[in-house]
Image: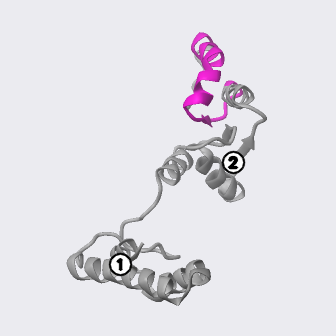
């Protein structure tokens, strides 16, 4: 943790406070040992990775590169491409996509629908796409297996859909 925060140029006192809260039940020695270990990693990365291209995200405009997850990157790409409907059944690793898009729904005029299962999710997205809306569905490996019949429908009707 200390090394990661050092590379990201976060303040160490935030981590020290968290370590105190987490390990306080185990005694002061355990707290201090964990803070010492975290500090060693923090100091090492601060000293040896001064030219890191990573930086913490801040509000407002910036010329710096963003540090985001794959799900956030996919969501930003979908919005940039004009996606207006997204359906999903929450299952790792795709839950972050619907969570992110639902948080931006009003701002970008899109619908993020949590379906009752994977089959309903893909069929909702197919319906939206068939009606002319740019649509996508997010799923997991197991969820994709359940979508195979609907995927056949997408092919037969030549309905565009991002999965």
Front residue of 162/44: it is: 44
Is 30 placed above or below 147 here? Answer: below
Front: mark 2 or 1: 1
User: 10 Å neighbourhood of mark 1: few (<14), some, or many (≥20)?
Assistant: many
Judge left or right: residue 83 versus residue 7.
right
Quarter of the figure with residue 154: top right
Q: Earlier in the sequence, mark 2 or mark 1?
A: 1
> Please, which residue is most extreme toward the right here?
116
Q: Which residues are magenta?
A: 130-156
Residue 68 seen anywhere in this rendered image of the structure = yes
Q: Residue 18: image x %, image y %?
A: 55, 81
Q: Residue at label 1?
A: 6
> In the image, 126: left or right of 1?
right
Q: Quadrant of residue 100?
A: bottom right
Tell me how far mark 2 sits from mark 1, CA to CA.
37 Å
The residue drawn where x is 57% and y is 35% is 140
- Colour setup of the view: one colour
Q: Secondary structure at mark 1?
A: helix
Quadrant for the C terminus in the image: top right
Decide whether residue 86 is among the magenta residues.
no
Find disc 2 in the rendering and name its residue.
110
Q: Is residue 88 above or below residue 51?
A: above
Image: 115 above or below 27? above
Question: x and y percent of residue 41 in the render?
Answer: 32, 77
Badge 2, how many Cα within 10 Å: few under 14, some, many 20+? many
Asked if the residue under mark 1 is in contact with the one under mark 2, i.e. CB atoms within 8 Å, the reply is no
Q: Position of residue 61 (x, y in %)?
A: 46, 74
From the viewer's perspective, is residue 116 above or below residue 19? above
**Depth order, front residue of 106/44:** 44
Of residue 146 and residue 160, the one placed in the foreground of this image is 146
């Amino acid at each position: 943790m200390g090394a990661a925060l050092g590379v990201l140029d976060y303040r160490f006192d935030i981590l020290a406070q968290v370590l105190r809260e987490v390990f306080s039940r185990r005694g002061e020695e355990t707290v201090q040992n964990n803070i010492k270990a975290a500090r060693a990693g923090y100091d090492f990365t601060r000293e040896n990775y001064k030219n890191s291209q990573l930086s913490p995200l801040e509000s407002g405009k910036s010329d710096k590169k963003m540090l985001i997850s794959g799900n956030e990157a996919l969501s930003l790409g979908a919005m940039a491409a004009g996606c207006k409907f997204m359906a999903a059944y929450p299952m790792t690793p795709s839950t972050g996509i619907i969570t992110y898009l639902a948080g931006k729904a009003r701002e970008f005029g899109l619908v993020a629908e949590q379906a009752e299962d994977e089959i309903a999710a893909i069929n909702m997205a197919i319906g939206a796409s068939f009606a002319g809306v740019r649509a996508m569905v997010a799923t997991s490996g197991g969820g994709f297996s359940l979508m195979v019949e609907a995927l056949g429908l997408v092919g037969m009707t030549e309905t565009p859909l991002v999965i």
